[in-house]
Amino acid sequence: MDFAPELIQYLWKAQRIAVLTGAGVSQESGLRTFRDAQTGLWAQYKPTDLASPEAFACDPKLVWDWYAWRREAIKSVRPNAGHYALHEMAQRAPHFTLITQNVDGLHEFVKHESLKTSQTFRDYSILELHGNIQRVRCSECGTFTDEWGDDTESVPRCAGCGGLLRPDVVWFGETLPRSALEAAVESARGCDAFFSIGTSGVVQPAASLGFAAHNRGALVVEVNMEPTPLTPKTDFLIQGKSGEVLPALVQAVWG
Ligand code: BV8
Ligand code: ZN
């Protein structure tokens, strides 16, 4: 896979790199993207209809079961070459911020795996803009918990206040975690190079980060299977699978 020499040169010299990932990065691990058609008993539902406070208020069991099904699906998948290439980029770029819309925790998994095994591990921020499906909290008092009954008849309740438990993700209509969003905006505005990878660039405010980087003069690189609303503002659109493009790009730049 060939890359423009000016891209390779620029990334080699870049001091601050910010990356935004979406569901496309996890697709090669076997996780459906957010807009892929759902399968099986979930085929009749659109994710945007289930990922909302209104859906949870209306049918908490249906929403809880959907997340339980997705948690199980994530347990059986592994990070792919695209996740590992981004971790490698984080080890080579002087300053690196990983911003993700994904709630599957796969970027964190790679980072913690390397923390345990690598002698030369260099830490970096992973900003989970939309939360993490593996974390569960009380919908009333906000207390986190990592164990709940296995009663499949009803939604588990908070041991402290009896409130319904819910996944610690950001639903449509809910505000993003302030500190993560502020850090993401700051890194998009302050970076030399911004990557938008595996995202359709539809969901706000995450989709605005690439424009913020462009407006501050950063080089913007998009790695995606298809053009998106951000494409006209990018310096490079590399159409392809992130699991193939990213390892080749990291190899070409950092050798
Ligand atoms: C907010 C967690 C302030 C849950 C997610 C009207 C009313 C109310 C709100 C709005 C409105 N209009 C706009 C909004 C704002 C709304 C929004 O953006 N709606 C969209 C649908 C228009 N946003 C919000 O509500 C946000 N909060 O704005 O708060 C507020 C408060 C009140 C009222 C107004 C505003 C909250 C948004 C967060 C929602 N939660 N996830 C869960 O996961 O269950 S979003 C969800 O979509 C996932 O996080 C996912 O990551 C994200 C974005 O999708 P993508 O990652 O881009 O995935 P997608 O499938 O779309 O695309 C995949 C891409 O990868 C494709 O382009 C494909 O070509 C490519 N691809 C596939 N395979 C590969 C690949 N590329 C490379 N390699 C491959 N192998
Ligand atoms: Zn509670």
Image (cartoon, rainbow, N blue to C red):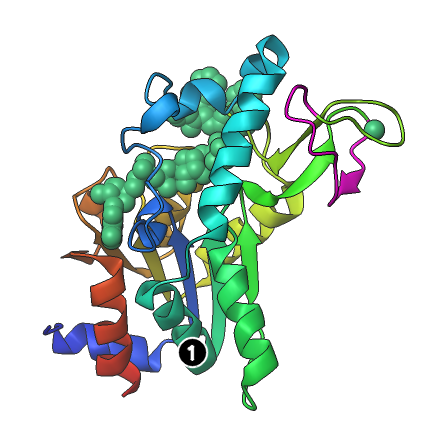
Q: Which residues are magenta?
A: 141-155
Tell whether 161 sits left or right of 123.
Answer: right
Q: Which residue is located at x 42 percent, y 60 percent?
A: 78
Q: Residue furthest top?
A: 58
Q: Is residue 121 visible?
A: no
In the displayed structure, would residue 35 be above or below residue 33?
A: above
Q: Does the magenta portion include 213?
A: no
In the displayed structure, would residue 232 be above or below residue 35?
A: below
Q: Is residue 89 visible?
A: yes
Pick the residue in front: 186 or 87: 87
Q: Which residue is located at x 29 percent, y 76 percent?
A: 250
**Majority secondary structure in the magenta region:** loop
In the displayed structure, would residue 162 be above or below residue 93?
A: above
Identified by mark 1, the residue type is Ala
Pick the residue in front: 235 or 120: 120
Pick the residue in front: 185 or 80: 80
Tell whether 64 sits left or right of 139.
Answer: left
- In the picture, the quarter occupied by the N terminus is bottom left
